[in-house]
Image (cartoon, rainbow, N blue to C red):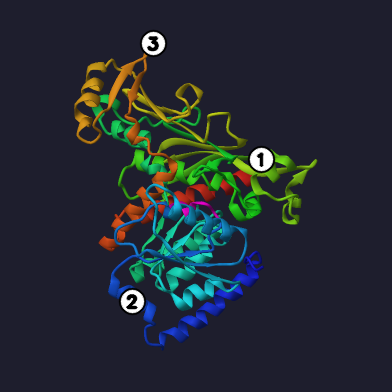
Amino acid sequence: MLKFNDKKRLLGSLTGILFLVVFQFCEPPKKADMEVNQRGKVVFMSLDPGHFHAGLIHKTMYPGVDSTVYVFAPEGDELKDYLNRLEGYNSRPEQATEWNIEVSKGPDYLEKMISQKPGNVMVVAGKNDIKIDYILAAIENGIHVYADKPLVINQEGFGKLKQAFAIAEKKNLLLYDIMTERFEITSILQKELSRIPDVFGELETGSLENPAITKESVHHFFKYVSGQPLIRPDWFFDVQKEGEGIVDVTTHLVDLIQCAAFPEQILATDDVDMLTAKRWPTSMTLEEFKKVTGKQDFPGFLNKDIQDGKLKVFSNGEMNYTLRGIHAKVSVIWDFQAPEGGGDTHYSVMRGTKANLIIRQGEKEGYKPTLYVALLDGQDAVLQEVIRTTLQEKFPGLDLEKLDSGEYLIHIPDHYHVGHEAHFAQVTEKFLEYFQEGKMPDWEVPNMLVKYFTTTKALEMAKQNP
C-alpha cells in the first residue's frame, strides 16, 4: 500500500500533477467544478485523513457547507478509522450529523483529488512531513486549504509554506490552520484582562530567567476521544513524519503568545529572537505501544529510535525567545497516559506591571483550566468592577472569589467550558466566515508565518545543542 513514505515517489507524483494542470488548462470546466461554483457552497475534500482531528471537524454540520464529503485516501486502517468516526457521528442518538461520504481509494489519491476536484476546500490532517506538499498541490490547482497543525515541521517545510502563501495570495485562496486553543475560555479571558490597563497595567518585558509570558502544555499518547480509546497510527511515533514535540503542539502555544501580546497586529520574522531551545525523548515500552496503536510489535521504520528495548520519542521540547523584545517561554511534555480523572493540561502566566494572570489545570482544579489573578498594586475594587460589571456584556455569569493565598479565582460558568472537541466546530465556523468574506484579517497570514518560523527555528537550535 503506497503511503508516499518515499519522498522521491511523492515528487514524481507531484510532477505528474503539473502535467495534469497543463492538460486541464485546455479543457472546458468539469461538471463538478461548475456545480461547486453554481452552489456557492463550501464542499470539503478530505485528503489522506491520518489524524483523528480530520474526523472531529465533521462532528458538527455547518450552514453553507455541502453535506457530501469527498474523501481521497489510500487503503488502510487510518481511512477505516476516519470513516468509522464519521459514521459514529451520523448514527449517534442525539445531534446526529447527516454527512454523505464519497470515497475514492487507491495509491493515486492525490492525483484523483486534483483531476476530479469535486470540492473547493481541501481538509488535511495526517502525516506532517508531506502535509506541506499536499498544501502546495492544492493551492497550485485553485483549491482552498483548511489544515490541521502543524503545517510544517522543519525549516525546509517553512520555505515551502512561504511559497504556498505567495501563490494563495495571487489566486485569492485561503490557507488556514486549525488553532483550537484560541477558543478556550480561560485563554480568552486571560487575553481580555491583559488589555485592561487598570487591572493588568502593561505587559512586562521579562527576562530569560523570568519570562513575561510562559506557556506550558502536557499531553498524553493514550487518551479517549468521543468516548472511545484513541488508536494512533504507528507512524505517529516517528518524529520524522509527525514532527518533534517542539514543532507540533507548540504551534498552539506560540500562537496564543502572539495573539495575547500583540493582538491583531502584523508581526514579522525579524521580531523573533530565539535564545535557547532543547528537546528530550519520552520512553515507551512495547506493551504501551501495543495499547495505543493496536500493533503487536515495533515496526521496522522505528528501529532507529529503539534503545534498550524501549522506543524513544522526541516529543518534548522547550524554547525561550523574545517577540518584539518581550521574553516568552514555551514548553511541551508528552506522557503516556494521564492520571485517573486527568487529561491534557495547560499552564500559562502573563506578567503585567499591576497583576499576573495565571491559568492552572492541575489536580487541585480537577484538571479543568482555571484562571487566577494575582494583584500587585492593591486594585481589588477595580478587578471586582471589571469582572462583575464590565465583562458581563461579553461573558454573562462571570464572578470572582478571593482565596486565602491572596489570589483571585475567576468563576466561569460551565457552559463556557465546551471542551477540546467542540473547539473544532468553532474554528471551522471562523474559517467559513473568512470564506464567505473572501479574505482573512491582514494579520493572519504574516502571523502564521512568524509562528512557524518560531517553531522550526527552535527545532533547528535544539538539534544543534543536544
> Comparing marks 2 and 3, which lies closer to the viewer?
2
Q: Amino acid at mark 1?
A: Pro
Residue 404 is labelled as 3
Q: Indicate which label's residue lies in the foreground, 1 or 3.
A: 3
The residue beneath circle 1 is 281
Q: Residue at x 56, y 79 (%)?
A: 16
Q: Is the stretch drawn in magenta largely helix, strand or loop?
A: helix
Could you tell me the amino acid type at mark 3? Asp
Q: Position of residue 169 (x, y in %)?
A: 35, 66
View extreme (right): residue: 308
* Residue 54 falls inside the magenta stretch: yes
Q: Given the current orientation, which residue lies at the most extreme front position? A: 93
Q: Is residue 209 above or below residue 183?
A: above
Residue bearing mark 2: 35
Q: Observer-nearest residue: 60 or 144?
A: 60
For the record, the magenta segment spans 51-57
Looking at the image, is mark 2 or mark 3 earlier in the sequence? 2
Q: Where 166 falls versus 455 (above or below)?
A: below
Q: Which mark is residue 78?
A: none
**Three-letter residue code for mark 2:** Glu
Residue 159: give x, y in percent of width and height: 50, 61
Q: Nearer the viewer, mark 2 or mark 1?
A: 2
Residue at the image position 65 percent from the left and 64 percent from the top: 5
Rendered view: 104 above or below 334:
below
Closer to the camera, 81 or 196?
A: 81
Q: Residues within 10 Å of mark 1 (few under 14, many from 20)?
A: some
Q: Which image quadrant: the N terminus?
A: bottom right
The span from disc 2 to disc 3 (Cα, nearest Å) is: 64 Å
